[in-house]
Image (cartoon, grey):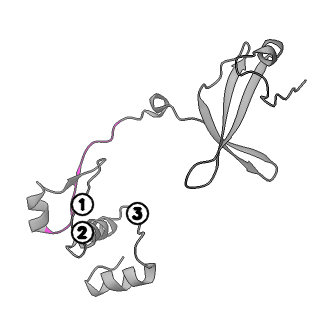
Amino acid sequence: MLALDDLTTDVLDKTAHSIAHGVIRLEELTRDYGGERRRMRVMKYRGQAFRGGYHDFMIRTGGLQIFPRLVSKEHLTQKAPVTLLSSDNTELDALLGGGIDSSSSTLVLGPAGCGKSLLVFQFVAAAIRRGEKAALFIFDEELGLLFRRTKSMGIDL
């Protein structure tokens, strides 16, 4: 049997909880900015283990698409050895103690036009030459313009 509760009774009223073996709560949140957010929570599932907390979901043609809450402890992997990533620029790598550490995050700061992008492109181009993978997420420039600009600087992405 499937019973639906429209949540019009007192929030502390657990009548529906007492008659059901399983209770799943669905919510829609409207934020001040961005799209609406839908989430679900398994409140009770008698005799079964379940993942607690809120899980995002989307309504799709054919049903719901659920995005289970992530638990970081379940995603532990063996640590890869830390290596130094070279920019293939001897002087730059020397300033950085040989390069930048793999498996790390590096934040490049500076005003517009100071060379932040060019610095990053050095590392990306060097990775490509080594046969490694690299990803760029560019939000402020049209892709064709970016490729033309880097190519004119001798960096063919």
Residue drawn at the location 26% of the way across and 56% of the way down: 107
Q: Is residue 26 above or below residue 137?
A: above
Q: Quadrant of residue 151?
A: bottom left
Q: Which residue is mark 3?
A: 135
How crowded pointer 1 is (Cα within 10 Å; few <14, some 14-19, many 20+) is rated as few
Q: Is residue 63 above or below residue 107?
A: above
Q: In this rendering, does residue 67 appear at all?
A: no
Where disc 1 sits, the SS reads: loop
Q: Are marks 2 and 1 in contact (CB under 8 Å)?
A: yes
Q: Quadrant of the N terminus?
A: top right
User: At label 2, which amino acid type do we have?
Assistant: Lys
Of label 2 and label 3, which has the lower sequence position?
A: 2
Residue drawn at the location 38% of the way across and 80% of the way down: 146
Where disc 3 sits, the SS reads: loop
Q: Position of residue 31 (x, y in %)?
A: 58, 48
Q: Is residue 4 above or below residue 113?
A: above
How crowded pointer 3 is (Cα within 10 Å; few <14, some 14-19, many 20+) is rated as few
Q: Quadrant of residue 76?
A: top left
Q: Which residue is mark 1?
A: 108
Query: Residue 81 in magenta?
Result: yes
Residues at marks 2 and 1, CA–CA distance in whole angstroms: 6 Å
User: At label 1, which amino acid type do we have?
Assistant: Val
Residues at marks 2 and 3, CA–CA distance in whole angstroms: 16 Å
Residue drawn at the location 74% of the way across and 48% of the way down: 59
Of label 2 and label 1, which has the lower sequence position?
A: 1
Q: Please state the extent of the stretch shown in magenta in the rendering.
A: 79-89
Residue drawn at the location 33% of the way across and 80% of the way down: 156
Q: In this rendering, does residue 128 appear at all?
A: yes
Give the number of the disc on residue 116.
Answer: 2
Q: Quadrant of residue 136?
A: bottom left
- Name the residue nearer the viewer: 145 or 58: 58
